[in-house]
């Protein structure tokens, strides 16, 4: 099983109003689709360390991690039959997000206006995660 980590980068962990979405530039089947930034966990690396590394490489940012967006499964959200992704809320602490690797555009979208976030063409496996995130933010536990 391939372990992937993703960040729901929000403008505030305490009272999020915007989510940072990243548009893929590759591979061809996902180019032009939106996703949570992140990537694969390398051997010997914790999921949290992998997420910090990936965000620095892909977007040039540092973040403070908040709670994990639970999927109800121990491995996280199923991406396909060989990979799953764990997603954490994250707040910027340093850097200005820029599409340095794997992305050609970044966009802040409203989490209060669910239609704005849901209207983006998300990678299919990320779409249920976006829905869960919006439900959690709009009606926090």
Image (cartoon, rainbow, N blue to C red):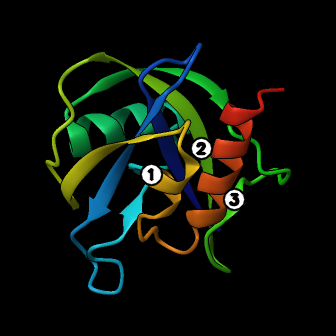
How crowded pointer 3 is (Cα within 10 Å; few <14, some 14-19, many 20+) is rated as: many
Q: Which residue is drawn at 37% across and 49% down?
A: 21
Q: In this view, does 59 lie to the left or right of 68?
A: left
User: Could you tell me residue 58's position as x and y percent?
Assistant: 24, 46
Task: Locate residue 72, reporting x and y percent.
Answer: 85, 50
> Is residue 40 visible in the rendered structure shown here?
no
Query: Which comes sooner in the sequence, label 1 or label 2?
Result: 1
Query: Considering only vertical position in the picture, is 73 above or below 70?
Result: below
Rendering coords of residue 98 (x, y %)? 16, 40
Query: How far is the residue under mark 2 from the one under mark 3?
Result: 8 Å
For the residues labelled 1 and 2, say whether their Cβ atoms are less than 8 Å apart.
yes
Query: Sequence order check: which comes first, mark 3 or mark 1?
Result: 1
User: What is the quadrant of the N terminus in the image?
Assistant: bottom right
Nearer to the camera, 132 or 88: 132
Residue assigned mark 2: 87
Helix, strand or loop status at disc 3: strand
Secondary-structure class at tag 2 = strand
Distance Cα–Cα, label 1 vs label 2 = 8 Å
Question: Residue at coordinates 21% horizontally, 34% vertically from top-left?
Answer: 97
Element at label 1: loop
Q: Earlier in the sequence, mark 2 or mark 3?
A: 3
Q: Nearer the viewer, residue 51 or 105?
A: 105
Q: In the visual, does 13 lie left or right of 40?
A: right
Query: In the orientation shown, which residue stands out farthest toward the bottom?
Result: 29
Badge 2 local density, few (<14 within 10 Å), some, or many (20+)? many
The residue to which callout 3 is attached is 77
Residue 4 in percent (x, y) is at 53, 55
Look at the image and tell me in which quarter the C terminus lies: top right
Q: Which of marks 3 and 1 is in front?
A: 1
- Whether the residues at callouts 2 and 3 have beta carbons within 8 Å, the answer is yes
Q: Identify residue for label 1.
A: 36
Q: Which residue is drawn at 56% across and 36% down?
A: 112
């Amino acid at each position: 099983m391939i372990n992937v980590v993703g960040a729901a980068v929000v403008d505030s962990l305490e009272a999020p109003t915007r989510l940072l979405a990243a548009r893929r530039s590759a591979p061809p089947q996902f180019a032009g689709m939106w996703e949570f930034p992140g990537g694969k966990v390398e051997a010997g690396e914790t999921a949290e360390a992998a997420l910090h590394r990936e965000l620095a490489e892909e977007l040039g940012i540092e973040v403070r991690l908040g709670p994990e967006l639970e999927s109800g499964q121990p491995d996280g959200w199923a991406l396909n039959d060989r990979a799953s992704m764990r997603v954490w809320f994250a707040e910027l602490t340093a850097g200005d997000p820029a599409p340095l690797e794997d992305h050609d555009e970044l966009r802040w979208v409203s989490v209060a206006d669910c239609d704005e976030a849901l209207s983006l063409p998300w990678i299919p496996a990320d779409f249920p995660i976006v829905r869960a995130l919006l439900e959690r933010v709009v009606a926090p536990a």
